[in-house]
C-alpha cells in the first residue's frame, strides 16, 4: 500500500512524498525527472515494499506546492539546493545520516549522480534511468554529431515563454512527446495532475534555468551502479549511454532495453522492477 505524506525539511519546504514498505526497512530514495513527476515510480513502490524495502518517492522542489519558492528567482532552484532537499528527505524518512539506496530518472538522475559522487558513504547503490554519467554526456555532446540535436530542448527551456509553450493546447507538446516515447496515456494524466499547471511548470523549468547550458564536471562513481537505458530514448544517444561505463569505478551493470524510450519505469515497469530489485539485493546496505 502506498502512503502519501507531507514531509517538512524546513519551515517553508513541505514535500509531498509517496511511501511504501515497512518503517525501518532499507530505504530506497527515488528522484523523478522533468516532464514527469513522482508518479514515474508508481509501479516500483509496491514492488519494492513487497521485496522488503522502504521506498521513498518525493515530489521535488517546485513540484510540491508546499516546497515551491519563487520560480522567477532562478537561484532558488540551484542544483546544490535540489541535492540538499534529497538528502534532507532521506534523513527525515530514514533517519539522520542514514545510508540508502538511490534511484534517479532524467533530472533526478543528474542529482543522483552528484549525490553518489559526493557522498558515497551514504549511498549503498545507485540505480540510474535514462541519464548518462555527466562526463559521458559532455563527451557525447562534443563527439556524437546527433547528441546536440537530441539535447536541443535544454536550450529551448531557457526561453521566457517555455512554460506557456509546453502547456499550450492542453499540454499538447508533453502529450505528444510522452506518446512518442511509449508512455501509457494513464501515466501521462497522472504526471499532468502534478505538473500541468503554470506554477508547477515554471518551477520545473527553473531547474533548467538555474543551471543554464553548463553542466559542471563530477568525479567517477565508486558505489555499485545500474544504468537502464531505452534504445529508443530521444534525448540520450548510444555514445553517451555506452560511454557511462568509463566513469564507474565500482561494480557496474548496463541494461539497454530494445524498443523502450525515455521513460522505462512507466513504459516497462515489470522489467524495470526486476532489474532494480536484483541490483538492490546484490548490494545490501
Image (tube, helix red, strand yellow):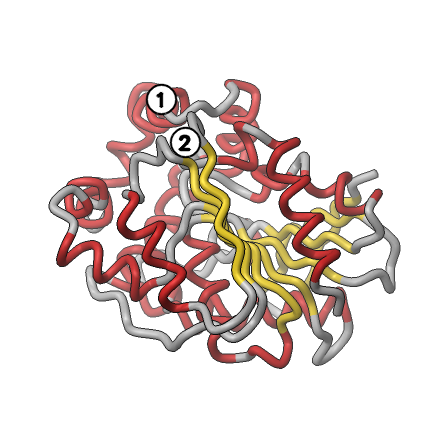
Q: Quadrant of the N terminus?
A: top right
**Picture quadrant where residue 119 is located:** bottom right
Residue shown at 54%/61% (left/top)?
Answer: 225
Residue 161 spot, x, y in % from top left: 20, 41
Residue 196 spot, x, y in % from top left: 44, 33
Q: Nearer the viewer, residue 240 or 48?
A: 240
Left or right placement of residue 113 versus residue 17 in this view: left
Which callout, 2 or 1, points to the residue nearer the camera?
2
Q: Quadrant of the C terminus?
A: bottom right
Instruction: Tell me: residue 220, above or below residue 62.
Output: below
Left or right placement of residue 126 versus residue 20 in this view: left
Q: Dots 2 and 1: beta carbons under 8 Å?
A: yes
Residue shown at 68%/40% (left/top)?
Answer: 274
Q: Earlier in the sequence, mark 2 or mark 1?
A: 1
- Density class for disc 1 (Cα within 10 Å; few <14, some 14-19, many ≥20) is some
**Mark 2 to mark 1 CA distance (whole Å):** 8 Å
Residue 268 spot, x, y in % from top left: 57, 29
- The residue carrying mark 1 is 180
- The residue carrying mark 2 is 261
Amino acid at each position: 500500500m502506498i502512503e502519501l505524506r507531507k514531509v517538512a525539511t524546513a519551515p517553508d519546504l513541505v514535500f509531498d512524498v509517496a511511501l511504501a514498505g515497512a518503517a525501518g526497512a532499507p530505504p530506497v530514495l527515488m528522484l523523478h525527472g522533468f516532464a514527469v513527476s513522482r508518479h514515474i515510480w508508481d509501479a516500483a513502490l509496491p514492488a519494492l515494499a513487497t521485496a522488503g524495502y522502504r521506498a521513498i518517492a518525493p515530489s521535488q522542489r517546485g513540484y510540491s506546492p508546499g516546497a515551491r519558492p519563487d520560480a522567477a528567482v532562478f537561484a532558488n532552484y540551484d542544483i546544490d539546493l535540489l541535492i540538499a532537499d534529497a538528502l534532507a528527505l532521506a534523513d527525515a524518512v530514514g533517519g539522520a545520516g542514514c545510508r540508502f539506496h538511490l534511484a534517479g530518472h532524467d533530472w533526478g538522475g543528474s542529482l543522483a549522480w552528484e549525490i553518489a559522487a559526493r557522498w558515497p558513504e551514504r549511498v549503498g547503490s545507485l540505480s540510474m534511468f535514462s541519464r548518462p554519467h555527466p562526463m559521458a554526456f559532455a563527451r557525447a555532446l562534443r563527439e556524437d554529431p546527433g547528441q546536440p540535436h537530441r539535447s536541443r530542448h535544454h536550450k529551448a527551456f531557457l526561453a521566457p515563454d517555455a512554460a506557456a509553450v509546453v502547456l499550450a493546447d492542453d499540454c499538447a507538446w508533453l502529450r505528444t512527446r510522452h506518446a512518442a516515447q511509449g508512455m501509457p496515456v494513464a501515466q501521462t494524466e497522472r504526471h499532468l495532475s502534478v505538473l500541468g499547471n503554470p506554477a508547477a511548470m515554471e518551477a520545473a523549468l527553473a531547474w533548467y534555468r538555474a543551471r543554464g547550458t553548463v553542466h559542471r564536471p563530477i568525479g567517477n562513481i565508486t558505489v555499485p551502479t545500474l544504468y537502464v537505458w531505452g534504445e529508443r530514448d530521444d534525448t540520450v544517444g548510444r555514445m553517451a549511454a555506452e560511454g557511462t561505463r568509463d566513469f564507474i569505478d565500482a561494480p557496474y551493470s548496463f541494461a539497454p532495453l530494445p524498443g523502450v524510450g525515455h521513460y522505462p519505469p512507466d513504459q516497462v515497469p515489470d522489467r524495470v522492477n526486476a532489474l532494480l530489485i536484483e541490483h538492490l539485493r546484490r548490494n545490501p546496505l
